[in-house]
Amino acid sequence: MRVGDLVVDPLHREVIVRGKVALLTPTEFQIIALLASDIGRTFSREEIISAIWGADYNATNISIPVYVRRIREKIEENPSEPRYLQTVWRCGYRFGDGRDETAG
């Protein structure tokens, strides 16, 4: 899966950004692969936890925002203005199309 200058390679479990491999943890890779599997779809916190840890997992100690921040630091040119791993306020997270949403 290629979006802009980012490639998610599930076969090799790699994310390549601007030609360099991003060093993601296995959990970080699972999260980005899930979001990238359906570009533009918003995944709720509960959907992400269910898909990665399982529906029966006690989710009280999982901080999805922390995972998202760490992933952004590794893949985004400017983590404060993400082009790929986007927050949909009060709904969840989605994988964007790589375009700068602030550009008119």
Image (tube, helix red, strand yellow):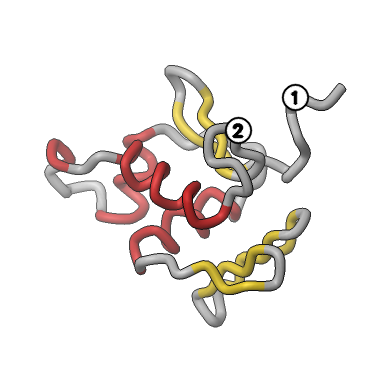
Q: Position of residue 83 (x, y in %)?
A: 66, 40
If the image is split into quadrants, where does the N terminus sit?
A: bottom right
Q: Nearer the viewer, residue 88 or 50?
A: 88
Q: Position of residue 14 (x, y in %)?
A: 53, 73
Q: Residue furthest top?
A: 90
- Residue at horizontal 33 percent and vertical 55 percent from the top: 52
Q: Are marks 1 and 2 in contact (CB under 8 Å)?
A: yes
Mark 2, residues whose alpha carbon is within 10 Å: few (<14), some, or many (≥20)?
Answer: some
Q: Relative to residue 21, is residue 6 drawn left or right? A: right
- Above or below residue 12? Residue 48 is above
Q: At label 2, which amino acid type do we have? A: Glu
Instruction: Give the alpha-carbon distance from disc 1 to disc 2, as whole Å.
Output: 9 Å
Q: Secondary structure at mark 2?
A: loop
The tag on residue 102 is: 1
Q: Nearer the viewer, residue 104 or 60?
A: 104
- Residue at horizontal 47 percent and vertical 50 percent from the top: 73
- Residue at horizontal 25 percent and vertical 53 percent from the top: 54
Q: Nearer the viewer, residue 37 or 98?
A: 98
Quadrant hosting residue 21: bottom right
User: Which residue matches tag 2?
Assistant: 81
Q: Position of residue 44 (x, y in %)?
A: 42, 32
Q: Position of residue 82 (x, y in %)?
A: 60, 38
Q: Relative to residue 3, is residue 38 drawn left or right? A: left
Q: Relative to residue 71, is residue 38 drawn left or right? A: right
